Amino acid sequence: MICACCLKHLVRCKRSLETRDRRRGIRWGQVDRLEDLDFADDLCLLSEAPGEMQTKLGDLIKLAGKVGLTINIKKTKALRVNTNKTEPFMLGGESIEDVDSFVYLGSKVTKEGGAAQDVANEFKKQMVLLYNFTQ
């Protein structure tokens, strides 16, 4: 946990130095940008452009190496939302597996960009609970 926090801090410090005059990440509201999501030892990088994502991955592996950490390629996944791009992202010379969906903080995110199936599943669970409660 401490190592993940250190790595996230290094990524943010490097990013703040490099991106003072550039916009990276995804648009969040009218003027803000969101570059990543962090929770415990998970780091979810965000980008609107494949080239930018590849740059972020390169920065991540360099920074991890500087502090003696490695990124587990088998646990690293790519989810492309609303795009036809299929060129694999590379991390340390290996391609990252593309997935159709993943669960982040209990919510399922899909490559179509929505969480409609997650909402439908939650609704079904609540209906079953209600039914069992009334029986």
Image (cartoon, rainbow, N blue to C red):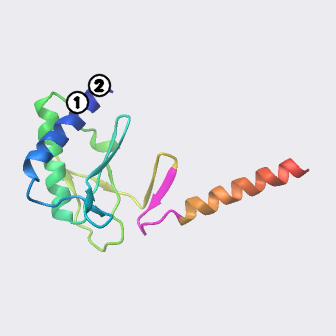
Query: Looking at the image, do the residues carrying marks 2 and 1 touch, with CB atoms under 8 Å apart?
Result: yes
On the picture, is 77 further left or further right than 114? left
Q: Residue furthest bottom?
A: 84
Residue 95 in the image, given as x and y percentages of width and height? 23, 53
Q: Quadrant of residue 86?
A: bottom left
Residue 110 on the magenta segment: yes
Q: Is residue 46 above or below residue 50?
A: above
Q: What amino acid does circle 1 point to?
A: Cys
Quadrant containing the N terminus is top left
Q: What amino acid does circle 2 point to?
A: Ile
Residue 56 in the image, given as x and y percentages of width and height? 17, 51
CA distance for labels 2 and 1? 6 Å
On the picture, is 10 further left or further right than 31? left
Query: Which residue appears at 26% of the width and 60% of the height?
Result: 32
Give SS at disc 1. Answer: helix
Q: Quadrant of residue 55?
A: bottom left
Q: Would residue 70 be seen by someone viewing this image from the given angle?
A: no
Find the magenta span and give its range: 107-115
Of 22 and 102, nearer the camera is 22
State the residue position of label 1.
Answer: 6
